[in-house]
Structure formats: C-alpha cells, structure tokens
Image (cartoon, rainbow, N blue to C red):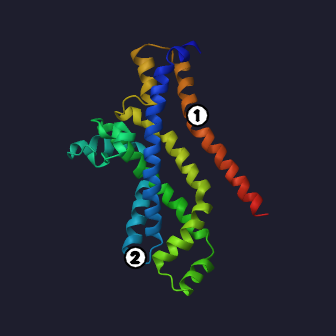
Amino acid sequence: MRLLIDNFDVFAGGFWVTFQLCVISAVAALALGTLLAVMRVSPVPPLRMVAAGYVAAFRNLPLTVVFFFTAFGLPALGSNASILKIPGLDLLFRRLGTDLPYFRFAVLALSLYTAAFVCEAFRAGINAVPAGQAEAGRAIGLTFSQNLRLVILPQAWRAAIVPLGSAIIAMIKNSALAGFFGVVGDLAQTADQLTSAEGNPFIPVAIGICIGYLVLTVPLGLLLDRVERGRAAASR
C-alpha cells in the first residue's frame, strides 16, 4: 500500500492517459460501428458486402495483430496517423495534436477492432425492432433513410445499449495492450516503468493497475446492470 501512495502521481498519470485513450476510441468505435450497422441493413448490396467483410475480418483477427499493423505497418507505409490531428479535438486531448503517433495508432487499433463488435450489437438492436414499425414508416411515405433515422435507430439504440456497453467494457480492458506498442504513460506502461525500470515489487504495482482499470469498468458495468433491470421491470 505504501508503494501505491508514494507513486500515486505516477498511477494517476497512467490512469489519465488510459482514460483519454478509451474515451476517444469508444466514441470513434460507436460512430464507425453505427455506420457499419446501417450499411449492413442497407438495401444496396455493395454496402452490405463491404460492411459484412469488415465485420468478418476484424471479428476474426486477434487484437494483437491489429495493433502490430497499426503500430508498425502504418509507419512502414509512411503514415503517422495525422488524420486524427483534428482541429479543436487536440485542444481537449492534447496527445492527439502532439508528436505522439503511437497514441494515435492505439486509437486507430482499438476503434477499428471494437467497431466490428459495436456493429453487430447495434445490428441486433435494429433487428429487434418490430417489422411493423418499418412498414408503418413506409406506409406514410418515409424513405429508407428517413425511416431508419426517425423510426428504427431510436428504438434500436435502446435495445442495443446493454451489448454496446459490454463491447465498450471489453475495449477498455483491451486498451492494456497499448502500453506494449509504444503508448507512453498509460497504465500498462506505468506498470512496466515501476517494475522493470525502478525495480519495485510486481504485486503492489499490479494491484494499483487493477484498481485503475476497475475504476474505469465497474461504474459502467453497474450502470448497464441498472439499465437492464429497468428494462426488465418495464417489460413486465
């Protein structure tokens, strides 16, 4: 416990880096996953094929392979993920705007990988909406996009919120890989710094890292449990 107190600023810094990484990746994965889910239910066959191929590829690839490609393959191709240097966003998350490409590579890896699972969770939510809802929208003259935006998606979000939350919790745990692929200062890299570089015992450091991840995941899990209980009570 003394080790955790003496190195609280180090753990806090690692927690903050991991928090930023997870927030950015979660938002990107939700946005991309939603787009993919819409493509998968689209009446346009090429869009369905592209989305289905994406999901099949990323659901069956190990996340480590995705990290390897983004952290080492993209630099070999001459990319530093500068597409994530979004004006305004880098003021809130400074690591996106500074010359820390491995942070951006980690965001890409987590976002691209998690989006496949978000897509399937959201598609299940879309399929859970009664077919009569879409038919009623078509009956009053709504186009496919209007029907999807105004009728289907709002109901699909409510049906998919629990599996979507589970996908984000899995992504938070997966972010532990980032420290081993060049992301400086996150919780995993903090553990390596305190044990390998400074020679501290592993168990207290591991406990501190576990506490950091639990702070990120447990509140979200409790929120999902509450949502699920509320839905179950409403359906009675």
Sequence-first disc among 1 and 2: 2
Residue at horizontal 46%, vertical 68%? 38
**Quadrant showing the C terminus:** bottom right
Residue highlighted by disc 2: 45
> Residue at horizontal 46%, vertical 32%?
16
Question: Can residue 192 be seen in the rendering of this structure?
Answer: yes
Front residue of this view, candidates 32 and 139: 139
Residue 177 placement, left or right of 147: left
Tell me the amino acid under the disc marked 1: Val
- Name the image quarter holding residue 121: bottom right
Reading the image, the residue beneath label 1 is: 215
**87 shown above or below 178:** below
Q: Is residue 129 above or below residue 183?
A: below
- Quadrant including the N terminus: top right
At a point 49% along the width and 26% down the height, the residue shown is 12
Secondary structure state at the residue bearing disc 1: helix
Q: Which mark is residue 27?
A: none
Q: Indicate the position of residue 142 as horizontal and vertical percent values.
A: 50, 82
- Mark 2 falls on what kind of element? helix
Relative image position of residue 114 (x, y in whole percent): 46, 51
Instruction: Residue type at mark 2: give it.
Output: Pro
Residues under labels 1 and 2: Cα distance?
43 Å
Q: Is residue 65 visible?
A: no
Going by the image, does 186 lie left or right of 102?
A: right
- The number of numbered badges drawn on the structure is 2
Q: Which residue is located at x 40 percent, y 28 percent?
A: 185
Picture quadrant of residue 211: top right
Where residue 171 sits in the image (x, y, percent)? 50, 45
In this rendering, the label closer to the viewer, 1 or 2: 1
